[in-house]
Amino acid sequence: MTKIERRAMLKTIGLASFGALSPNLLKGETLREPYSVSEKPITTDILIIGGGTAGTIAAIQAGRAGAKTTLIESGSQLGGTTTTGGVSFPGIFHAWGKQIIGGIGWELVLDSVELNGDKLPDFSKTPERHWKHQVAVNPALYSLLAEEKCTAAAVDVRFYETPTMVEYKEGRWFVESVGKGVKNQISCSQIIDCTGNALITSMAGYDVLREEDTQPGSLVFSMGGYDLKSLDLAKIPKKYHGYLRQNMLESQIRSTGENTSVPYGYVYVKGADSTTAETHTLANQKGRQNLLDLIRDLRGLPGCENIRITNMKTETAVRETYRINGEYKVTKEDYVSGKIFDDSLSYSFYPVDLHRDGKSIYQEFLKPDIVASVPLRALIPKSSRNFLVAGRCVSSDRLANSGLRVQASCMGMGQAAAATAVLAHKNGTTPSDVSVDDIKELLRVHGAIIPGEI
Ligand SMILES: Cc1cc2nc3c(=O)[nH]c(=O)nc-3n(C[C@H](O)[C@H](O)[C@H](O)COP(=O)(O)OP(=O)(O)OC[C@H]3O[C@@H](n4cnc5c(N)ncnc54)[C@H](O)[C@@H]3O)c2cc1C
C-alpha cells in the first residue's frame, strides 16, 4: 500500500468511527431555561468570614467543638496569606526553648511538614535570627490538608462568596452573601471576622482604625536562570542584591534538601490594601508591574541575561489595613513587657516589626523570656454583640500589631475566638459574658497552650 492510499484509508476509518459515535455524542443537547441566581436561606451557629491564616483554624475549632459552622472565603483555597499570598513559613510557635503556640495551627503545620517529608528547625535553642524558627510549609499541601480538616469537622466551606449586608436583629445576625451565581441569606448566632481587614466589623457598624500611612504589601515570587559563575554582585547595583541573594539562597537550600525557614523574593507594593475588590485589584496590578520592571532591569545585568520568573503568587500579600477598636487595645508596652492578662487566651512571639517605607524595617526584639499575649477583649469590637475578630486586625496599637500580626499568633487567635464563639452560642450569650475559665478549658481540650501555663 502506498503512503497516499494508507492516509486515505485512515481518513475513511476516522470518518466511519466519528459517524458511528456522533449520534451518541450529540444526544444531550437541549435548550436550557435562562440561568437565575440561586438564592438559599442558610441557618448556622458560627459564621466565619475569611478562610485565611486565622479563619481556617477558627473554622476547624468551631466544627470540632460541635457547632454548626459556615466559612465564607472570597478566594478559591484556604490559607490566605500563608498559601495564596506565598508567605508559606508560619511563625513563631516556639520561644526561649519552649513551645508557646500549639493547638490546631500547629497540628496543621506539623501534618504539612510530615507529609511533605520536610525537617523541622531545631527548637531547643534560641536562634540568632528569630525567623529561623519559622516553619516552611508546602503551600499547596497546606491548603489541601486545611480543606480536609474542615471537611472532617463538618465545616460548610463556601468559596467565591463575600458578604454584602450584615445586620443584627433580635439576638441573631443576618448576612447576605453573594458569589458566582449565588445570593444566600445566612442567619447565625455568632460571627467571627477573619478577613484581615476588619471589613465585616465595619459593615456591622463597629468602629475600625487605620494609620494614615500603612506598611507596603509584597508580591511574592521566585526567579531562576541566573548564571552563578558570572554573577558578580560588585558589578550589580546594590538595590538588586537583596533579590539575587534571596534566590541564590533558595536554590542552595533546595539543593541541600534543607527545609528550615525558606527565604523568598518579593517586590514591595506601596499602599497595598486587600479590603475591597477594587483596592486589591490595584495592589495586584502594581505588584505585577513592579515584578515585570524588576525582571526587565535584571536581564540587563551580568549573569542575569537569562533570568526568568519560576513562580509568582496570584495575589499581592498585604501587611496592614484596618484594625478593630476593641474592648481592649494591646499596646506596644504590653507587647514588649510580655503582659499576661486575666483573659489572655494565646501567646504571640515576634519582634516589633514595621516595614516603614518599602526600604527599611523598624525592629525591636523581645528581651529574654518575654512572650506577649492576646487578651479576649482585643478580639471583641467595642460595644459589639455576638461578634469576634481574629487575625491581623486584632485590637492593638500599630507597633504591637506589627508583632501580633504574624501567622502563629493569628492561628492562636483564630482558635481562641472560635472556642469563645462556640461557648457563647451554647450559652445563648455574647462573647464578653462567657466565662474565661470555660474558654481556657475548651482550648486545652483542643491542644492549645494557655498563657501563664507553661
Ligand atoms: C509579605 C508579607 C510577609 C510576611 N512575613 C511573615 C513572616 O515571615 N512570618 C509570619 O509569621 N508572618 C508574616 N507575615 C504576616 C502574616 O502572614 C499575616 O499577617 C497573617 O497571615 C494574616 O492572617 P489573617 O488570617 O489575619 O489574614 P489572611 O491570611 O490574609 O486571611 C484573610 C482571608 O480572608 C479572605 N477575605 C478577605 N476579605 C474577604 C471578604 N470580604 N469576603 C470573604 N473572604 C475574604 C481572604 O481571601 C483571605 O483568605 C507577612 C505578611 C506579609 C504580607
Image: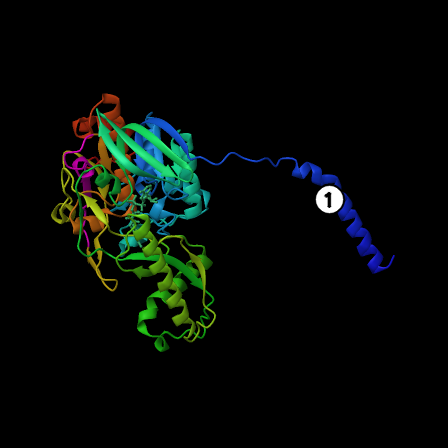
Q: Nearer the viewer, residue 390 or 345?
A: 390
Q: Secondary structure at mark 1?
A: helix
Residue of label 1: 18
Viewer can see residue 285: yes
| 60 shown above or below 52 | above
Query: Does the magenta run of residues contain 81?
Result: no
Residue 176 is left or right of residue 351, and the answer is right
436 versus 213 height, above or below: above
Closest to the observer: 382 or 341? Answer: 382
Q: Which residues are magenta?
A: 365-385
Left or right: residue 294 compared with residue 359: right
The N terminus lies in quadrant: bottom right
Q: Is residue 306 left or right of residue 394?
A: right
Amino acid type of the residue that numbered disc 1 sits on in the rendered structure: Phe
Q: Quadrant of residue 361?
A: bottom left
* Residue at the far left in the pictured view: 333
Task: Give left or right: position of 380 versus 235.
Answer: left
Q: Position of residue 189 (x, y in %)?
A: 27, 27
Residue in front for this viewpoint, 204 or 66? 204
Give the residue at x 23% y 44%: 393
Q: Is residue 23 above or below residue 259?
A: above
Q: For the C terminus, give its image quadrant.
A: top left
Residue 345 is situated, as x and y percent measured from the top left of the image, at 21, 35
Q: Pinpoint residue 84: horizontal percent, then vertical percent.
A: 38, 49
Q: Position of residue 139 (x, y in %)?
A: 41, 47
Residue at horizontal 31 percent and vertical 72 percent from the top: 238
Dominant SS type (magenta): loop
Q: Residues within 10 Å of mark 1 (few under 14, many from 20)?
A: few
